[in-house]
Amino acid sequence: MVPLSGLWTYCLAPGGTRLLFASARRLLLILLLSAFSAPEACVPHTEPCPILARVGHTVRLGALLPTRQPARIQNALNRALASIRHQSGGGGDSTATTASQLAPLLPYNLSLEMVARSPAGWDPESLSRSACQDLVVRGVSAVLAFPRSKEELIQVEFLSSFLEIPFISILEDTEPLVTKNPFHLQMSARVPPSTLGSLLLAVLQGGDVERARGSRDEDSWGGAAVICSGWDEGGDGLLTHLQRHSGPNWHLWDIINLTRITGSRDKMGKEEKREDQMEEEALNIISSSFLRSPSSISSVLLLGSDPECLSSVLRAAQRLVPSLPALQWIMGYPLSPDSLHTLGGPLGLLAYGEVGRKPISFYIRDALQLIGRAVTAATNVRPDLALIQSTLNCYDKASKHEPPSSGRFLSRFLSNTSFTGATGLIQVDPSVSRILSSQLFHVWSLKRGALGQPAWVTVGQWTRGQLDSDGDILGLVGGLGNSQGQGLGAGVRGGDGQGDGHVGGRWRPGLSVEGHRLRVVTLVEHPFVFTREVDEDGMCPAGQLCLDPKTNRSEIIQGLYNQLHNPNSTVVDLEGVDLPDDLRKCCYGYCIDLLEKLAEDMGFTFDLYIVGDGKYGALSGTGRWTGLVGDLLSGAADMAVTSFSINSARSRVIDFTSPFYSTSLGILVRSHDTAAPIGAFMWPLHWSMWAGIFVTLHLTALFLTLYEWNSPFGMTPHGRNRLRVFSYSSALNLCYAILFGRTVATKTPKCWTGRFLMNLWAIFCLLVLSSYTANLAAVMVGEKTFEQVSGIHDEKLHHPSMGFRFGTVRESSAEDYMKKSFPEMHDYMRRFNQPTTPEGVHMLKTDPPALDAFIMDKALLDFEVSIDADCKLLTVGKPFAIEGYGIGLPQGSPLTRNVSEFVSRYKSDGFMDMLHDKWYKVVPCGKRVFAVTETLQMGIQHFSGLFVLLCIGVGGALLTLAGEHTFYHLVIPRLRRSHTLQYWLHTSQKIHRALNTTYEDVGKELTGFDQK
């Protein structure tokens, strides 16, 4: 109820004064409303009091992000704000950190603005500067802090006391301070060592009470701690807490250090021998410690993280059972439910761990709700102190004599607020300045099941400092599982059980997806989903572990996951199930990256498996859906993530998210290599280029001859009376030698004009020959021809009588489209349909090919083309049947809307483009060049034209030789007798001398030449 002073001062809107004096009846009505109505009801107008206008209708909160991984905390802040906005029915971008409407928390439609800053460091100077300059000046009502160490937590403690602004420290790896500071509340998101110590003491002291009843000396009961490598006690760790808070029923008597046992390798270095030696060392050290202990050892805590040491100690513990049957072994550090299945040891071994572990965003959400509820309560009493911040300057603080500050006023309401939030019941303990949340721990015991196999059974649970068990936990050694103990499939497993509603179990409709586990089915389709074998340890160094069950039966899939997460469990009956030897695969690809991103942003985990029948899903003749659709309908899977095409038939029975990838159908064909013809060596240049080369050659030779004979320095009889003459035949010989790069003796022109023209001809030949050589290899190998298909309406597809073979993937979206749009074509192609895309592509690439064309999603075909090493594949024709890939969910799933929002966000912020570049950024075959080390092999068939040309040249030479003899014996004697056409020097020096010189003259010329 609002006080009358608050009504008079703050609840009257402008113009309300006239209402007070209008009539006594109206005044009485207002007073009655103020006495019996909520604060909002006292406002006569929709606009609240002027104080709201002064603060801008906004409540500001600050956040001091850690210096390490600030983006992770920022994302958690965004998720927490988005979750609160969604609960309050707000709209807009869920990632926005401002203007998030919190109608159920804040009155008067106030909005919440988050001011998040990351200090340069968490030293006093940097932290104070960031808080004062970035947060205080903005008028924040409270601050969320994320200290990572005790020193940083102390800095926040001092800063909150100085500023008198409420701080809430959310601790992940830090022990909270024991303090009584009204301005600083501490909220543990992870269980600190002190809490773990209290849990262990509750188990140990509760169990030893029964034993101590029969003992005369109650102080004689206690235990020891065995320390393996990897245990970090720190300054105030678990062992320190156990020693400090030991009671009369249990005391920590001894600490056995096994950090130095390593086992000595033998000469052969066998690992089995080393493990046996480590076990013997551990057994000897533990046994001797027990014998030397002056007090009775009733229980042993095992601490550490070295798997070899832990395994050796547990094997040694099994060997100690006959001699020390009452000795209780306990895993001293918390374990996850999934890790239990790889842990063996003596019967009665106890372990504990947190179940339903909430992510950091849940704690941030509860902290925001705590502040929002406190602000609402404070506003109802004093809006001025609740909404208007008195501290806006770190250097101008109010004195002690002034009225209480807004921070001090709000801190009183924070200490008195409690509610049920995302992490359970939220309460504030002002005596230690802590926010108490509900964290549930289970205590498990390794017992012999009904079938004689060891199985982990839940024997107790611990929450809010109270242990709830079915009896004496430590008295269950070797006992059989009873009806009171919860089997591992009843909520203990973090993996596959149906769960008990706690975070970490399998998600069911009605539960929040954050913190739960989804069952996701996929289908191998490159590049969206690839698979590879697991490593030697059965794990995946890269990608996600997935199962390949080879079946669609939901009960078998459920059994496989139970066996995977709990190999020793007897809860799930796998009798009659024939399991393959190796079900583990590593899945990776485009869709796996998308799934990982969704899991990170939405806060869930997932189990992944490959659809058993390898099909997308279609309605069978029996009226049942197969493939991915069938698994969603049967409940075997909660989500289907792969290249899942959205069509009308599937959309009638399941839900799809908004498309994350748009594609269409395409047609894939294969190239056919054709042998190079005889004249292939001439193909690098067009016939017109060949003709131009030889015409230019003869013209160049003609001009060389003319320049030489018309120059006073030419190699001619009248030039310098030379013995040798440069004739037209000499010019032809020179031009051919330059063109083909022959190294033979030639006559070169002597005049400057001829030499210049000869060099120009050499440059011309160099460029032509280089271009020819560059294109020769590709042309000599032969060319590739593709099936000419213009598109889906091509005659080859619509007239099967022509023998054109084509198909698609059975029960795919492509087959559904062909069946509806082209029924006759579908009837023909059914015989050629293939079970998967890779098999269809393989049928195209066989010799001879079994298919002439393959119809499938163009996104898949483009990838097959890009990775084709032989460059024999090509998509042809125009794309058709535009479609999209979406994530499939059961019909009416509450996840559809949320996942669609995230997919749309990924498309707008460029994440989907990044995935496309990552998985499709392969050099297309059409743009690929030969590698330097790649050898292009050519056979004799590629050079057949050159051999034919050589044979023609030999035959032509024989004919030329016969022509020379005919000319010499028949034509030359006739020319001599006729005394005509006697001058041939400009054409051929040999013919000229044969006509005008006798043998005696030739001998004299040669003799004179030698003498010179």
Image (tube, grey):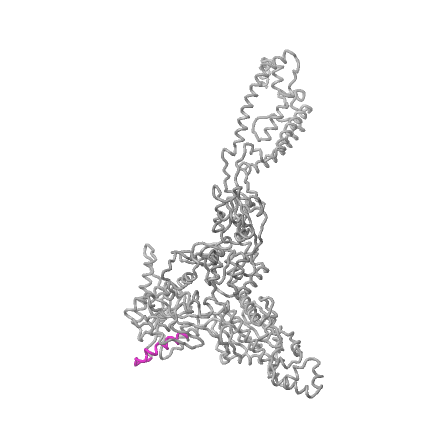
Is any part of residue 486 visible from this angle? Answer: yes
Q: Is residue 579 left or right of residue 601?
A: left
- Residue closest to the far bottom: 24
- Where is residue 331, by image quadrant? bottom left
- Is residue 543 visible to the viewer in this orientation of the structure? no
Q: Nearer the viewer, residue 579 or 386?
A: 579
Q: Give the camera-side residue of 449 and 234.
A: 449
Q: Quadrant of the C terminus?
A: top right
Location of residue 566 (image quadrant): bottom left
Q: Look at the picture and state if 501 lies above or below 609.
A: below
Give residue 768's position: percent from left, percent from top.
Answer: 61, 35
Q: Is residue 370 above or below residue 654?
A: below
**Residue 476 placement: quadrant:** bottom left
On the image, the x and y values in percent for residue 614 come to: 46, 54
Q: Residue furthest left?
A: 323
Considering the whole magenta stretch, tell me its main secondary structure: helix
Q: How many numbered dots are placed on residues in this image?
A: 0
In the displayed structure, 309 sits above or below 28; it is above
Q: Give the range drawn in magenta.
A: 199-218
Residue 58 image offset from top left, x and y in percent: 62, 74
- Where is residue 710 shown, x and y percent of the image? 69, 24
Residues 140 and 731: in front is 140
